[in-house]
Amino acid sequence: MLEKGNPTGEVAVLAKAQGVLKSDVTVKAARGLSHFGEHSAGWFALGLVGAAVDKKRRKDWLVAAVGVVGAHAASIAVKRVVRRPRPDHPSVEVLVGTPSKLSFPSSHATSTTAAAVLYSGLTGRNLVPALVPPMLASRLVLGVHYPTDVLAGAALGGVVGGLIRRKLKRR
């Protein structure tokens, strides 16, 4: 349902963020991240590359890659329960297509954070600061999520990734 009038609440925050962050370069980058993260496919593929390259920890890479997909699936389950519609206000420009009309939580934020947490444990480098903020910002730039959608998605991905990473450490 299209909201009318001046934006308030999260719509106002989203519109402001989009206004500040949006440029030709950021929209292009955000669309690239969107395509890469769709259905967690890019993150899953990176896990498969890790499994192919790091033969000693192949099983751990495969568990991590499946964990990323699992985090994505968890976000879809939450979306179907919450059923929050995507932003729909004249002050917000939607700049990419989406596979569903449901917004909460952001599946891109969920799978990206899970991948960052899991792959950090396998690479020995903290990938979270490099991977998570750009993906979260991209969802706002593209106008497809409210700020709480991306924060909740990051939290869900962090929990799922953290639980799986803990199990991998025990082996």
Image: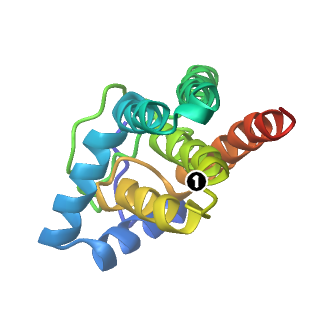
Residue that numbered label 1 is attached to: 123
Identify the residue shown where x is 53% and y is 30%: 65
| Left or right placement of residue 115 versus residue 48 in this view | right
Q: Position of residue 101 (x, y in %)?
A: 37, 29
Q: Quadrant of the C terminus?
A: top right
Return the residue found at the far right. 170
Amino acid type, mark 1: Thr
For the residue pair 134 and 9, the one nearer the viewer reads as 134
Mark 1 crowd level (few <14, some 14–19, many ≥20, 10 Å Cα): few
Q: Position of residue 45 (x, y in %)?
A: 38, 32
Return the residue found at the far front. 56
Identify the element where label 1 is drawn. helix
Identify the residue shown where x is 24% and y is 71%: 22
Q: Quadrant of the N terminus?
A: top left
| Left or right placement of residue 132 versus residue 156 in this view | left
Look at the picture and state if 106 lies above or below 29. above
Q: Position of residue 124 (x, y in %)?
A: 64, 59
Q: How many marks?
A: 1
Q: Position of residue 134 (x, y in %)?
A: 41, 64
Identify the residue shown where x is 71% and y is 36%: 160
Identify the image quadrant of residue 68. top right
Residue 94 visible in the snapshot: no
For the residue pair 74 and 66, the one nearer the viewer reads as 66
Return the residue found at the far bottom. 20
Residue 6 visible in the snapshot: yes
Identify the residue shown where x is 53% and y is 52%: 150
Look at the picture and state if 43 lies above or below 20. above
Identify the image quadrant of residue 36. top left
For the rendered model, the colour scheme is rainbow
